[in-house]
């Protein structure tokens, strides 16, 4: 293995760690502007993280090892996923180790432990958040896998790097199946990353919070890791969407000369996606929890139609 | 090459027709339902014109225009006026709940794919792969008529079924003869007017458009 590739791998993970808070800050900034408020600026998430990292951890007396272990696991899975998904280059040493189904499983592990940690302390909110999160997960994951199967079928591989390569080499074809899978993916990504209309990342209102309810008991560096992992998850879902539906710009070869271009393309796409997220969040209200099965059912329907139209039409 | 792209665009439009059929199946509000019906007509009309252009069958332009004027403009307008006059504001009730209906719909698509797979092998037209979608649209229209209780939604289901038949004709044989299509278009138009009159009568007789009320017509014993 060339040392160059290893360095690129490290650079990509560093870009993920460094840019995920900036992306979260960008979304927050646009949201503030669209609602006529003054924004705290692009750097506010960094300041938040720095503040949390310097604070002491307050642990409940009955917290078990699960509670203390979860932030590291959630953070670790996000970093690992960032090493596999082609964000800057497709020529990654880690890419052959895991395909896109494993990435879904990585997110599922993180979610499973977050839900356990929410219940671990034994407060009412944690349990409520966990139960809601698992309901969303049980509905979102089949749809997610179905969308991913459609993309994998259309590109004849479940490995993300291979998918990007096939898209690069293939002639441009209009595929209805991919359009359906893309729509489904957008709905699922909104649900998985806890954005409006599924969950509101900015609220601590008892009745509506899902993800915030689970991590209510965290403080100090634990909270910093969980928050950072949350930002990375948003970043990674966008990167996953880009890699499977519109990868143009990701470096096809592992060389340093291709990286600046890939970085510029990535920043442009992230900026665009951030704008779309803000438009969606400003235009929609949060759904009632019991309407979520319909929302995620629509995602499942779309991804299934994508799969069917792959067989019928393509 | 041109034919290949035509087949791709045609299958894309077919996918949109199927999507709007599913949209109608799960839509609860009656105005949204009518709008989705109009969208389906629009996709159908574009598809027909496209097939007519690439297959060199110019009478398809006329059927495309007929579809556009009837199913995109006139019928949705009539239905909107009806809904306004009858003051239907309630959400549409269905016999089976929405997720189950959706799953039955998916099963119907798979069924029609299996049914149409041999036909697809025999056909040489550019639209051959959309045949299964057309059959699925017909079946979803039927499903809608069965699962909805409201008279107006049942009519929209019937019209969606007719859309599916028209689509099937276009994709199986590049459309029916023009005389037949004109006749069918006229039939649908007349049917819409007659339905309208029926709605008013049902509404005055039962104070509701819920067809379950008609069980009251049975003689008690």
Image (cartoon, rainbow, N blue to C red):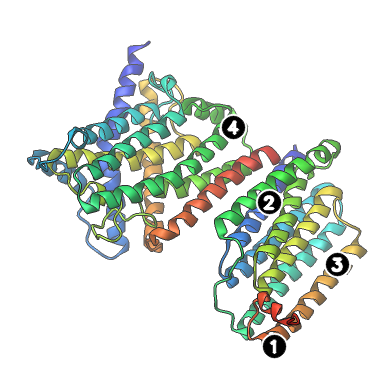
User: Mark 4 = which residue?
Assistant: A153
Q: Is mark 4 on a helix, strand or loop?
A: helix
Task: Give the Cα distance between marks 1 and 3.
Answer: 31 Å
Q: Do labels 3 and 2 share a chain?
A: yes
Q: Is residue A195 above or below residue A175?
A: below
Q: x, y percentage for residue A47?
A: 15, 45
Question: Which is more toward the observer, B147 or A271?
Answer: B147
Q: Are marks 2 and 4 on the same chain?
A: no
Q: Is mark 2 on a helix, strand or loop?
A: helix
Q: Is residue B160 visible?
A: yes
Residue, far bottom: B204
Task: Give the Cα distance between marks 1 and 4.
Answer: 55 Å
Q: x, y percentage for residue A164?
A: 50, 29
Task: Give the Cα distance between marks 3 and 2.
Answer: 23 Å
Task: Give the Cα distance between marks 2 and 4.
Answer: 21 Å
Q: Name the disc covering residue B13, or none.
A: 2
Of marks 1 and 3, the one in the foreground: 1
A239 relative to B40 in the view: left or right? left
Question: Which is more toward the observer, B125 or B34?
Answer: B34
Question: Which is more toward the observer, A194 or A130?
Answer: A130
Q: x, y percentage for residue B66?
A: 80, 67
Mark 1 burial class by Cα count in 10 Å: few <14, some 14-19, many 20+: few
Task: Give the Cα distance between marks 2 and 1.
Answer: 42 Å
User: Mark 1 = which residue?
Assistant: B205
Question: Which is more toward the observer, A219 or A17?
Answer: A219
Label 2 with label 4: CB-CB less than 8 Å: no
Task: Give the Cα distance between marks 4 and 3.
Answer: 40 Å
A131 relative to A149 in the view: left or right? left
Q: Name the disc covering residue B184, or none.
A: 3
Please give the name of the residue rendered at 51% of the width and 25% of the height, measured from the top-left corner.
A162
Q: x, y percentage for residue A249?
A: 45, 33
């Amino acid at each position: 293995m060339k040392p160059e590739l290893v360095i690129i791998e490290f650079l990509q993970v560093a870009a993920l760690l460094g840019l995920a808070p900036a992306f979260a800050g960008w979304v927050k900034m646009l949201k503030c502007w669209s609602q006529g408020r003054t924004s705290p600026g692009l750097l506010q998430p960094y300041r938040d993280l720095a503040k949390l990292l310097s604070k002491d951890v307050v642990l409940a007396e009955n917290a078990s090892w699960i509670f203390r272990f979860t932030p590291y696991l959630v953070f670790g899975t996000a970093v690992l996923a960032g090493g596999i998904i082609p964000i800057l280059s497709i020529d990654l040493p880690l890419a052959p180790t895991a395909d896109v189904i494993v990435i879904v499983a990585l997110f599922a592990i993180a979610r499973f432990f977050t839900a356990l940690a929410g219940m671990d302390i034994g407060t009412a909110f944690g349990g409520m958040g966990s139960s809601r999160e698992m309901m969303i997960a049980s509905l979102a994951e089949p749809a997610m896998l179905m969308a991913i199967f459609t993309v994998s079928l259309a590109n004849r591989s479940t490995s993300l790097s291979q998918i990007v390569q096939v898209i690069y080499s293939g002639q441009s074809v209009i595929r209805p199946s991919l359009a359906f899978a893309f729509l489904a993916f957008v709905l699922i990504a909104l649900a998985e990353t806890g954005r409006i209309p599924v969950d509101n990342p900015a609220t601590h209102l008892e009745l509506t919070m899902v993800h915030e309810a689970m991590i209510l008991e965290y403080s100090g560096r634990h909270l910093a890791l969980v928050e950072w992992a949350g930002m990375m998850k948003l970043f990674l879902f966008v990167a996953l969407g880009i890699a499977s539906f519109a990868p143009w710009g990701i470096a096809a070869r592992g060389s340093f000369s291709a990286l600046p271009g890939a970085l510029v393309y990535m920043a442009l796409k992230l900026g665009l996606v951030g704008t779309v997220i803000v438009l969606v969040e400003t235009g929609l209200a949060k759904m009632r929890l019991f309407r979520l099965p319909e929302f995620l059912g629509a995602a499942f329907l779309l991804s299934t139609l994508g799969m069917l139209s792959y067989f019928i039409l393509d | 090459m041109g034919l290949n792209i035509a087949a791709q665009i045609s299958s894309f439009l077919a996918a949109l027709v199927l999507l709007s059929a599913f949209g109608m199946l799960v839509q609860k509000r009656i105005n949204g339902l009518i709008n989705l019906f109009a969208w389906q007509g629009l996709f159908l009309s574009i598809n027909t014109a496209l097939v007519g252009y690439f297959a060199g069958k110019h009478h398809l332009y006329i059927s495309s225009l007929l579809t556009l004027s009837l199913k995109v403009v006139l019928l949705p307008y009539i239905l909107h006026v009806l809904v306004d006059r009858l003051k239907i504001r309630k959400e549409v009730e269905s016999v089976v709940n929405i997720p189950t209906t959706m799953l039955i719909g998916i099963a119907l698509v798979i069924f029609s794919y299996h049914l149409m797979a041999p036909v697809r092998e025999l056909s040489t037209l550019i639209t051959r792969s959309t045949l299964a979608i057309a059959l699925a649209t017909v079946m979803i229209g039927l499903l809608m008529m069965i699962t909805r209780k409201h008279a107006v939604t049942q009519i929209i289901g019937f019209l969606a079924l007719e859309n599916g038949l028209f689509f099937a004709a276009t994709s199986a044989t590049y459309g029916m003869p023009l005389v037949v299509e004109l006749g069918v278009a006229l039939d649908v138009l007349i049917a819409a007017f007659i339905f309208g009159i029926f709605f008013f009568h049902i509404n005055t007789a039962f104070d509701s458009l819920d067809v379950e009320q008609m069980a009251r017509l049975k003689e008690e014993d």
